[in-house]
Amino acid sequence: MQFRFYTEQDYETVAGFFKQSGQYDPTWDTAENLKEKITRFPTSIIVCIEGGEVVASVFTMEDGWGTFIYRLVVRPDMQKQGIGRALMAFAEMTLKQKGKKEVAIFVHDTRQDLLEWYADQGYLFDDPKSYRSLFKKL
């Protein structure tokens, strides 16, 4: 298992993971948007390579105020093999090496399985309130 930072050549594979997992958003997940993300923040998308193929990816974001991990996805036939756990550890290490002391994650509140999985990784609920993300088209 190896990790590297996303390149434009990874787009179709990563977008395919999002589509398979129901996470794909045609507004956010365009090739142009991901290119812009890595142009501004070259280490903000990490991919996992197994057997010479990209099998998982995760996004990070740091804006000077907060640090976030989101959009973790592992190819369905490669799940339950420790890839997600290893990719999260690599993403966390990358952020820690940049001096980050804390990271937050985004998880859809209907995904109890993921909430439990992240709790097993040491993530804690910081408040009994349920936060929601709201979006507006500009």
Image: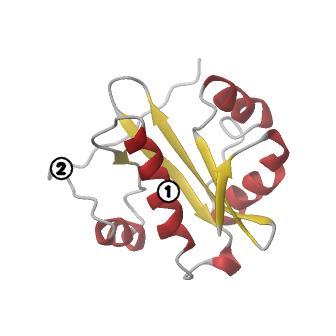
Colouring method of the image: secondary structure
Mark 2 lies on a secondary structure that is loop
Question: Where is residue 132 shown, x and y percent of the image?
Answer: 34, 42
* Drawn side of residue 58 relative to residue 8, left or right: left
* Drawn side of residue 95 relative to residue 33, left or right: left
* Drawn side of residue 86 relative to residue 18, left or right: left
Q: Is residue 125 above or below residue 82?
A: above
Q: Amino acid at mark 1?
A: Phe
Q: Is residue 121 above or below residue 131?
A: below
Q: Residue furthest left?
A: 128
Label 2, residues with CA under 10 Å away: few <14, some 14-19, many ≥20: few
Label 1, residues with CA under 10 Å away: few <14, some 14-19, many ≥20: some
Q: Residue furthest top?
A: 138
Q: Tell me the tag on residue 90.
A: 1
Q: Amino acid at mark 2?
A: Asp
Image quadrant for the C terminus? top right
Question: Where is residue 130 shown, x and y percent of the image?
Answer: 24, 49
Q: Tell me the tag on residue 126.
A: 2
Which residue is located at x 21 percent, y 55 percent?
A: 125
Going from the N terminus, do you reach mark 2 or mark 1 first?
Answer: 1
User: Closer to us: mark 2 or mark 1?
Assistant: 1
* Drawn side of residue 92 relative to residue 12, left or right: left
Which residue is located at x 37 percent, y 23 percent?
A: 64
Question: Where is residue 122 shown, x and y percent of the image?
Answer: 27, 64
Mark 1 lies on a secondary structure that is helix
Q: What is the spatial separation of the Cα atoms under label 2 and label 1, in whole angstroms?
A: 23 Å
Question: Where is residue 54 shown, x and y percent of the image?
Answer: 75, 62
Image quadrant for the N terminus? bottom right
Which residue is located at x 75 percent, y 37 percent?
A: 30
Whether tag 2 and tag 1 are in contact, CB under 8 A, the answer is no
